[in-house]
Image (cartoon, grey):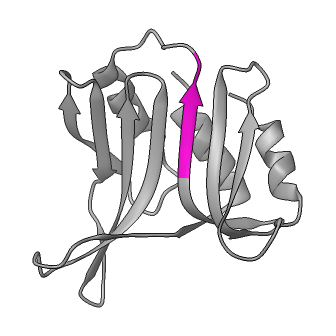
Amino acid sequence: MTLENIRAKLAEPAPRPGRYDLQARDEAGAWTVYLTLDKHDELSSLVWEISLGRTEAGSAALEERAVSIAKRVRGLVEPLKVYEIDSVNNVALLRSEEPTHREGKLFYYEVTLQDSTVVRVRRFQGWKDANQKRVQVAFALTNEVLGKLIEDLTAL
């Protein structure tokens, strides 16, 4: 997937303060990128969620896609690993190989693949004390890394 459409959207000023959505289709029309951002500028974005939707199912098996994504994605703070493959529901879960530990908190990425048509990327904060519930948090990426990440997620 080439991302000229999403790069053009990121070059525009933010539509308003606070959380907002950006949407773009790839040039071939196979993938639609949905970004939920807290803010962005000409160099970087504070991302709440990346969601990718595909109109047609891909030919690669779910496990093959999950393993390929874990190997290919290199722009995040922590490398990804395949955490779970649910072949009955056709869902794969990838998480940070090793969470970042900071001041008693754990930070990790979570990538969910549903069938071969949906990919979702989010970041969570947990605590070393397992009694506390995890919360979703925003994560910062340069726009160049964000574009490369989306290309890596849609390569198969």
Say left or right for 146 vs 10: left
Q: Is residue 29 above or below residue 124?
A: above
Could you tell me residue 153's position as x and y percent? 52, 36
Q: Residue at x 48, y 13 (%)?
A: 58
Compare residues 15 and 153 and report the one nearer the observer. 15
Q: Residue at x 11, y 75 (%)?
A: 130
Total number of numbered discs in the rendering: 0
Q: Residue at x 61, y 57 (%)?
A: 36
Q: Residue at x 82, y 38 (%)?
A: 4
**Quadrant occupied by the N terminus:** top right
Say left or right for 35 vs 44: left
Query: Residue reaching furthest bottom?
Result: 103
Is 53 in the magenta?
Answer: yes
Q: Quadrant for residue 28, please give it.
A: top right
Is 22 in the magenta?
Answer: no
Could you tell me residue 141's position as x and y percent? 61, 63
Could you tell me residue 123's position as x and y percent? 42, 62
